Amino acid sequence: MSRPPRGQDVLAIAPQAIASATTIEPLRQAQAVVLPLQYGMSLEQTAQTIGLSKGWACRLRNQFIEGGAVGNKGKSVRGGRHREHFTLEREAELLKPFLESARMGGILMVSQIKPQLEIALGRKMALSSVYK
């Protein structure tokens, strides 16, 4: 037997969110809460009804329950630069001479960029990391 769906505390505002949704994303998010709680649908049935995978339906549902909007970069939504070597500003500073030559019709060559990045980083880098 599956667990009972959670979210009873936000069930009162979910129908209002459905009525006021202006795009498909917030509509699906609110539907992911309402369908299991009011109509007894399973997560699989809910996902099929709103046209998403089971994982996305669960993610949208949890975002709504936590009070987050679709696309909100909260703790439950992964995004951003998680394995960055430099800040964006430092990276732009390091790549500036290479990008300027490329604007003038030159070609970006990773073999020229890699040593400069390694010096700035203070260690060797894999070629695949330089390409990224």
Image (cartoon, rainbow, N blue to C red):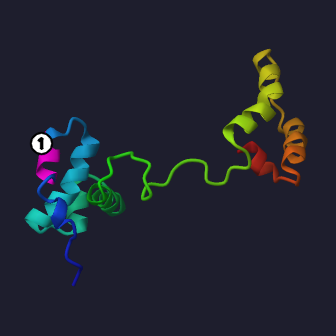
x, y percentage for residue 23? 25, 37
x, y percentage for residue 102? 78, 22
Q: Say how many tags the image has.
A: 1
Instruction: Give the vertical position of 81 relative to 6 (above or below).
Output: above
x, y percentage for residue 108? 80, 29
Q: Is residue 25 shown left or right of residue 80?
A: left
Q: Secondary structure at mark 1?
A: helix
Instruction: Give the vertical position of 123 relative to 131 (above or below).
Output: below
Residue drawn at x 73%, y 49% as measured from the top left: 85
Quarter placement of the C terminus: top right
The residue that label 1 is drawn on is 19
Quarter placement of the N terminus: bottom left
Quarter of the image where one finds residue 92: top right
**Mark 1 crowd level (few <14, some 14–19, many ≥20, 10 Å Cα):** few
Q: Is residue 99 shown left or right of residue 20?
A: right
Look at label 1 and name its amino acid: Ala
Q: Is residue 39 shown left or right of residue 96?
A: left
x, y percentage for residue 14? 16, 53
Q: Is residue 86 shown left or right of residue 97?
A: left
The part of the chain drawn in magenta is: 14-19
Residue 41 or residue 80, whichever sits in front: 80
The stretch drawn in magenta includes residue 20: no
Residue drawn at x 49%, y 54% as measured from the top left: 78
Residue 66 or residue 53, whichever sits in front: 66
Quarter of the image where one finds residue 119: top right
Instruction: Give the vertical position of 116 relative to 74 (above or below).
Output: above
Residue drawn at x 78%, y 45% as measured from the top left: 130
Q: Main secondary structure of the magenta part?
A: helix
Residue drawn at x 74%, y 38% as measured from the top left: 91
The stretch drawn in magenta includes residue 16: yes
Residue 111 or residue 75, whichever sits in front: 75
